[in-house]
Amino acid sequence: MKALQIDRKLARFAAARIAGALNPGGGAAYGPLELVDIDAPALPGPGWSIIKPRLAGICGSDLSTVDGTASRYFEPLVSFPFVPGHEVVADATTTDGASRRVVLEPVLGCVARAISPVCASCARGDLGNCERLAFGCVDAGLQTGFCCDTGGGWGTSMVAHESQLHDVPDDLSDEDAVLVEPAACAIHGALRAEPEDGHTIALIGAGTLGLLTLAALHRYAPEARIVVAARYPEQVRLAKEFGATAVCTSDELPRVIRSLTGSMAYGNQLTGGCDTVVDCVGNDASIAQSLAIVRPRGRVVLVGMPGRVKLELTTLWHRETQLVGAYAYGTETLPDGGRSRTFDLAFDLARTAGLGRLLTQTYSLSDYRDAIEHAANAGRRGAVKIAFDLRGEKRR
């Protein structure tokens, strides 16, 4: 089968890090990502089936891997060589030979790994917190797309466990469906923020994840005041469409929050601030700003994946700030007390918010260098989500 594959080649990772530092996405030309012809993955056991990707998105964690900047924390949770791609809409074959269109839930939890009894997290429905990500019937891999045994969406064929597959409703296009997995991440992050009507919420970052998180915040707290820090004109336009109360640059954000909340300032710190900050960037500057503009005993939610950062945390201690991570999805507790699987909520958000419009452009696998460069520079180029389109590939 045809696939983009990453192997453990340290010299290539080093080259990717240098190339990516010079030009985001540059690691695709010099790093460990290669277009190869390989055997399709074997079925790991009962309940697994072959699926054929239609569209597969390119996300921030993929880009950090290609550019050699991914955190070394993940090394024990990845197995090589692997085919990336975890934002996937695909064709699956039913037991009677019929075809069904599915979205992949990529976390490789206990059920997919044939581990019994399941861990406490999986028993609660918190798949993103599974405690067995390096064990069971498949090799280490926190998700499909980082596991050597499963393949990934950046290939013409892969395998998935039935517990990972969600049928796509007929009224959703492939373009809507490929946004469901990142929308599930965004919904989980938004609900970790515990939004309420009347709250003032700052959201830092208006790329794909930021805009999806904004759509989720607006869905679950429509009367909240949401201030979005956006960098590019297309991001500003979409943020307003998705329900932002105000949109500004990151430099303007402290002033806007100060005005909305009636706070004063001492140095870079506000005396009061917003109830919650949702950080969809996850670097030193964004986390530091989050801590500076949130009120005492407020909450900062890290939705964007942070790496190694250097921070002054005195304000977190002094103002008793909650610093909360938000990874993946599972089963959510809703503001009304109800419980629902995150992917069910994501399908609904894809439909009501028209998320397919965020898919800016697709590429073939053979054009992967252009695709990666476009995705890494999406905001600057007026784009949002970039994906691989495998519907025209020969899929054997």
Image: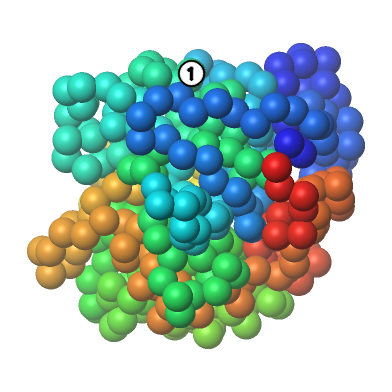
Q: Relative to residue 71, is residue 201 drawn left or right? A: left
Which quarter of the picture shows residue 6?
A: top right
Q: What type is the residue that disc 1 sits on?
A: Asp
Q: Which residue is drawn at 41% across and 71% down?
A: 169
List the single residue furthest toward the left. Answer: 337
Which quarter of the picture shows residue 205?
A: bottom right
Comparing 327 with 252, the one in front is 327
Q: Can residue 234 be seen in this view?
A: yes
Residue 325 pos. (x, y %) = 37, 42
Q: Which residue is drawn at 83% across and 15% down?
A: 11
How many C-alpha atoms fall within 10 Å of the one at disc 1: few (<14), some, or many (≥20)?
A: many
Residue 309 pos. (x, y %) = 55, 32
List the single residue furthest toward the front. Answer: 96
Residue 115 pos. (x, y %) = 27, 22
* The C terminus - image quarter: top right
Comparing 248 with 175, the one in front is 175
Q: Is residue 21 visible?
A: no
Q: Is residue 262 above or below residue 231?
A: below
Q: Relative to residue 279, is residue 392 drawn left or right? A: right
Comparing 249 with 58, the one in front is 58
- Residue underneath mark 1: 139
Comparing 45 with 378, the one in front is 45
* The N terminus - image quarter: top right
Q: Is residue 85 above or below residue 12?
A: below
Q: Residue at x 65, y 63 (%)?
A: 385
Residue 97 pos. (x, y %) = 47, 52
Q: What element carries label 1?
A: loop
Q: Which residue is drawn at 27% across and 66% down?
A: 195
